[in-house]
């Protein structure tokens, strides 16, 4: 009877340990921020400001982490 309890506790501990290890293997997925049209217009950055992607610039052109006025091909 005592061995069954010990085996059940050991099985439970190993199950919980595997759950915590598997949870740390996958990083959380980052979700792109959603903004209403009002806040999108208010938060657009001017030419020369720093940016991460095209949606942050008022010109919709982000090159080398800066808002550009026109593309390089023009």
Image: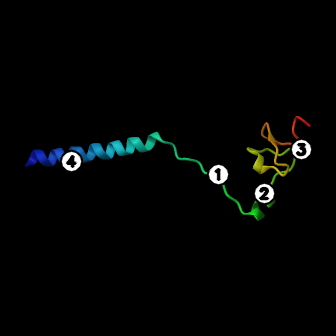
Question: Circle 2 sits on which residue?
Answer: 43
**Dots 3, 2 in contact, CB < 8 A:** no
The residue pinned by badge 1 equals 32
Q: Is residue 62 left or right of residue 5?
A: right
Q: Which residue reaches farthest right?
A: 74
Label 4: few (<14), some (14–19) or many (≥20) C-alpha neighbours in 10 Å: few
Is 57 positioned to the left or the right of 21 in the image? right
Residue 24: give x, y in percent of width and height. 44, 42
Q: Secondary structure at mark 1?
A: loop
* Gap in angstroms between the C-alphas marked 3 and 2: 17 Å
Q: Are marks 1 and 3 in contact (CB under 8 Å)?
A: no
Disc 1 versus disc 3: distance between alpha carbons? 24 Å
**At x 89% / y 44%, what residue is drawn?**
69
Question: What residue sits 28% from the left and 42% below the top?
Answer: 14
- Tell me whether circle 4 and circle 3 mark residues in contact (CB < 8 Å): no
Q: Nearer the viewer, mark 1 or mark 2?
A: 1
Residue at x 19%, y 48% (from the top left corner): 8
Tell me if residue 11 comes above or below residue 38 in the rendering.
above
Percent x, y for residue 58?
Answer: 84, 52
Residue at 66% in and 55% down: 33
Which of the marked residues, 4 or 1, is nearer the chain's N terminus?
Answer: 4
Q: Quadrant of residue 62?
A: top right
């Amino acid at each position: 009877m005592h061995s069954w309890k010990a085996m059940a506790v050991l099985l439970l501990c190993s199950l919980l340990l595997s759950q915590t290890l598997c949870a740390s293997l996958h990083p959380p997925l980052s979700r792109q921020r959603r903004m209403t049209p009002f806040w999108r217009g208010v938060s657009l950055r001017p030419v020369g400001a720093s940016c991460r992607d095209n949606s942050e610039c008022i010109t919709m052109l982000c090159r080398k982490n800066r808002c550009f006025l026109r593309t390089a091909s023009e």
